[in-house]
Amino acid sequence: MFSDNDLTTYRARLRGALIQPGDANYDQARTVFNAMIDKRPRLIARCADVADVIASVQFAREHGLLLAVRGGGHNGGGLGVCDDGLVIDLSGLRGIRVDPAARSVRVDGGCLWREVDHATHAFGLAAPSGIISSTGVGGLTLGGGIGHLTRRWGLSIDNLLSADVVLADGRLVTASEHSHPDLYWALRGGGGNFGVVTSFEFRLHPVANVIAGPTLWPLARAAEVMAWYRDFIVNAPEELNGFLALMTVPPAPPFPEALHRQKMCGVVWCWTGDPAKADAAFAPVQATKPALHGPHALPFPMLQGAFDGLYAPGLQWYWRADFVYELPDAAIALHAQYAERLPTLHSAMHLYPIDGAAQRVGRGETAFSYRDARWSAVFVGVDPDPKNAAVISNWARDYQTALHPYSAGGAYVNFMMDEGADRVKASFRDNYPRLAAVKRSYDPGNLFRVNQNIRPA
């Protein structure tokens, strides 16, 4: 471990705050998005700059401390915090610089996606990200980045141009196509296994206003709608993204009161094409005669933040996930059964399309292996009451277990809990040996292991 003198020397190297148990802000500093996570680190370094990150990595390595890295703190498994170790908190690194001429943006490692959306929207541009704007840029990107723009412009990692990384030995390097290309390959889907990313550079795309919103059908029609959706979305124009949800309607606007708290089947759409062609794109949707068809013109950041109020910090979360090639009728029947058992208002199942532009990248071109899957499925139990933790966990676990025989085998690492080494290997498939070799090169001692861990070869 370390002595008082070691701690004094370390503290003197930091511009940011060093927080310990007993400090007034300790409980706030150790809290993450998922209230089911209750870990107590020995030290929390709120880094003010890259020099603080370097000092913290060196301190953890030299003193054998377990090390966790926190960006937005949004990870379902609570992998941005640890017991008895050191947490590198990047929330003080929030700079953003947009280059509208080059259509690129440089984003510091502690930024949230809402901050990126705000900065880029001023220029009518956006970077592909997720669906909740309070998510941290770092965690979502390093796992892949599936969201509203996936079919049109690919995953977040498909738009990652470079990354500044503090390695396990304390060096700062830039990973890109031309600099440390093996590290650049691994960062694009391999998670936080290779270092602390202190800044990201993304390619931007012309996105200002979109035609977006939900379409809802009664849950009794879930099997019918899912069978229609599986054929429709893969043949729809790539300008149209839509993820399917089995969910309970929130008791709040913009949903009409007659639908409040009803279990329903829905699709959340995002049309990024010519607004004049939106009606034609949505005509087959309207032909299904839904109970509600809500897409309308709105600024892209408004769509990105649409679920932030429903999924605020402090809820209990339990995740399970799988990649999916097909949706056979037998799988759809199981989905309909588990949708009937939705345990709480916030619990849901989502199917995110990963076809279109995302499939034009080869499965070996980045660490994200499942380019041949059509959907990423997530089964998520959520509720504000800790008393319901077992209820939501059991529902999500049982649901995923029932559907797993129809899956591709692995899962999107951003949707996984702590599920063991075999599950991690299944989620990287044939990319795992190469990832383990890159891990050996950049982190041979496995300092960065509070993640979906890839062990050094």
Image (cartoon, rainbow, N blue to C red):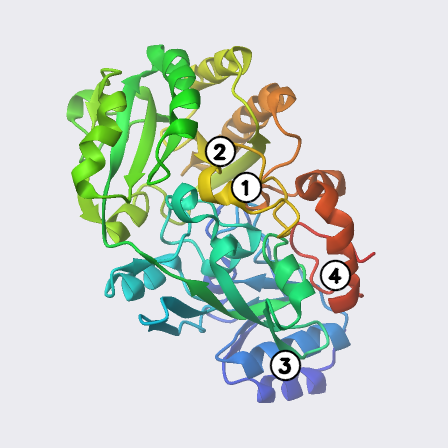
Q: Which residue is mark 3?
A: 55
Dot 3 amino acid type: Ala
Q: Is residue 126 left or right of residue 180?
A: left
Whole-angstrom CA distance, mark 3 to mark 4, is 23 Å
Where, quadrant-wise, is the C terminus in this rendering? bottom right
Which numbered disc, 2 or 1, marks the residue that appears first in the sequence? Answer: 2
Mark 1 neighbour density, 10 Å: few (under 14) some (14–19) many (20 or more): many
Do callouts 2 and 1 mark residues in contact (Cβ within 8 Å)?
Answer: yes
Circle 4 sits in a helix, a strand or a loop, which is it? helix
Mark 3 neighbour density, 10 Å: few (under 14) some (14–19) many (20 or more): some
Q: Nearer the viewer, mark 2 or mark 1?
A: 1
Q: Which residue is mark 2?
A: 380
Q: Is residue 160 left or right of residue 344?
A: right
Q: Which residue is mark 1?
A: 415
Which numbered disc, 3 or 2, marks the residue that appears first in the sequence? Answer: 3
**At which x and y percent is residue 311?**
36, 43
Whole-angstrom CA distance, mark 3 to mark 2, is 37 Å
Which numbered disc, 3 or 4, marks the residue that appears first in the sequence? Answer: 3
Where, quadrant-wise, is the N terminus in this rendering? bottom right
